[in-house]
Structure formats: C-alpha cells, structure tokens
Image (cartoon, rainbow, N blue to C red):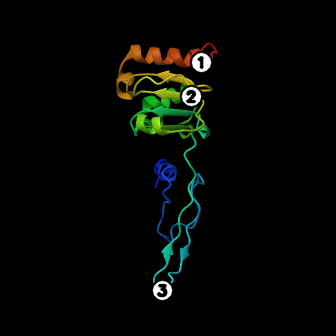
C-alpha cells in the first residue's frame, strides 16, 4: 500500500492491515511503516496479521510537488526542468489534482501544476503549465514556464 492510500485510510479512521511475509524483514527506505508481526489466534489456529502503523503523507519532505499524470517523472522534459531548478527527480512527488485537493499539511517549497489553476500558497512557489506532453512540444509554453521559474530563482517571484 502506498503512502497516499495509507494516509486516506488513516484519515477515515480505518486501521490498515498487512499480511506477514518473510520478505518484509526490514522497513521501507522511507520509513513509512513499522514491521508487522504475527499474533497467535486464540483458538491455536494460523497466526493473524497485526496492523501496520503508517505515517501520513508529508509533502514538506519534497522540494517540489508536481500536479500531473502519474508517469510525469519518467519524462525527459520533466527531468530537464527539475535539473534547471537544481533538483533531482528523487526530490519530487507527483500527485493528481484530487490527491492534492484532499491533502492537509505542510507543503513542498515548489508546486508545479499541469492540471489547472490552484490558489497561491504561503511558503510555496507556485508555477503553472499545460500538460507535460503539450509543454514539452510547445516552445511558447516552455518559455512561459521558464519565465515563472526564473522569476522565483532570481527572487522576483511573489510568494
């Protein structure tokens, strides 16, 4: 289960469960879960799974949140834009507009929306562009996007 779905379950008050498997010897690299253990059934039957503690989604640990299609980080164009900003793909998190709208918490330093207008956010640099596919083919859209990025990097962008 990814962090977003675990977060949704947590917000709804639902305890996520995960079957115990020998391949789960260590927690994930992100530290999002604790290890499950097995509990014996009261009747002596097969062991039961224990609930897995999950941490809610925290976007402040990313430098940039990209509101785009899920495969956006596979795009050479997106990787090039990130590099122009001094960022690596590992510092980015891709969300859908619905996931973003449902999120309540601290935000990343940058927010790039390819799925429509969003309000300005305090402490975040908000940039907009058409879809990744369209922007990667359209020179005018690239110039507009770069102009937004450059204004923030030079300190002229408003917060």
User: SS at mark 2?
Assistant: strand
Quadrant containing the C terminus in the rendered view: top right
- Cα distance, mark 1 to mark 2? 10 Å
- For the residue carrying disc 1, how many other residues have a C-alpha within 10 Å: few (<14), some (14-19), or many (20+)? some
- For the residue carrying disc 3, how many other residues have a C-alpha within 10 Å: few (<14), some (14-19), or many (20+)? few
User: SS at mark 1?
Assistant: helix
Residue at the bottom extreme?
44
Q: Nearer the viewer, residue 79 or 15?
A: 15
Residue at image mark 2: 110
| Spot occupied by residue 70 in the image (x, y as percentages of width and height) | 40, 40
Residue at the front extreme?
13
Q: Nearer the viewer, residue 159 or 23?
A: 159
Q: Residue at x 46, y 84 (%)?
A: 45
Q: Would residue 79 appear left or right of 105 to someone viewing this image?
A: left
Residue at image mark 3: 43
First-in-chain label (3 vs 2): 3
The tag on residue 39 is: none
Residue at image mark 1: 152
Residue at the right extreme?
155
């Amino acid at each position: 289960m990814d962090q977003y779905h675990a977060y949704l379950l947590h917000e709804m008050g639902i305890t996520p469960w995960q079957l115990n498997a020998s391949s789960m010897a260590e927690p994930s690299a992100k530290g999002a879960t604790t290890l499950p253990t097995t509990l014996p059934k009261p009747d002596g039957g097969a062991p039961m799974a224990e609930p897995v503690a999950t941490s809610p989604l925290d976007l402040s640990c990313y430098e940039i949140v990209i509101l785009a299609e899920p495969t956006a980080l596979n795009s050479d164009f997106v990787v090039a834009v990130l590099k122009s900003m001094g960022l690596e793909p590992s510092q980015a998190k891709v969300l859908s507009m619905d996931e973003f709208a449902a999120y309540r918490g601290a935000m990343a330093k940058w927010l790039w929306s390819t799925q429509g207008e969003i309000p300005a956010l305090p402490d975040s640099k908000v940039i907009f562009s058409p879809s990744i596919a369209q922007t990667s083919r359209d020179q005018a859209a690239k110039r507009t996007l770069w102009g937004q990025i450059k204004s923030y990097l030079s300190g002229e962008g408003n917060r």
